[in-house]
Image: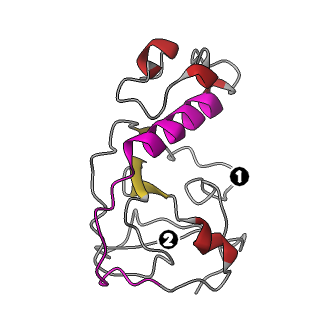
Amino acid sequence: MVPTDDPDYCFSASKSYLDFILVVGASCGIDMFVPNTSVDHNFSIKFNLHLQIKPFKAKYGTLGFDPTGAMWSIGETPSEELWIGMPTQDFFDDPMGIQFEMDQKHGDTRLSAGHCRIMRIFIIWVLAQIPGRDIYILNMWEADIWSSWCGLEEMTNAL
């Protein structure tokens, strides 16, 4: 196992002959997506916040939690798919956790609609904090995230 905070290691599958690589962060956050190099002019992420219908189809690997209702595809780099996993609180309460293997039986991996809306609002809010970007979100606390029509498309220009 490679420590994720090792400054001499950068995760990438751009020049690999592997057909599958699963990198799970050691803590909460999306820092696993960002290379730990000072400058990488070739790094880019194509965000797509409408991929909540895409199932997580990994058949191998140790995720650390049951992916049922917990996985959201948010985009890709030129060589990798990017997923956010939202495990249950049990995962955080027990640091050793249950080592869930992807070949074990699990349910539909797609994130629930309400949780997907929560994550969309959060990611749009983070993007709106970047200076010089023309992204905005208005009245984000008024979005009815549990309704099938929460009005998010009228609150932001990011969708």
| Residue at the image position 40 percent from the left and 68 percent from the top | 67
**Residue situated in front as seen by the camera: 106 or 80:** 106
Give left or right: position of 93 versus 81: right
| Residue at the image position 60 percent from the left and 73 percent from the top | 90
Q: Are marks 2 and 1 in contact (CB under 8 Å)?
A: no
Q: Which residue is mark 1?
A: 38
Residue 121 horizontal/vertical position (percent): 54, 32
Q: Which residue is mark 2?
A: 23
| Residue at the image position 46 percent from the left and 21 percent from the top | 152
The magenta segment: 100-127
Circle 2 residues within 10 Å: few <14, some 14–19, many ≥20? some
Residue 94 image-quadrant placement: bottom right
Residue 57 horizontal/vertical position (percent): 27, 66
Residue 100 image-quadrant placement: bottom left
Give left or right: position of 30 versus 149: right
Residue 106 on the magenta segment: yes
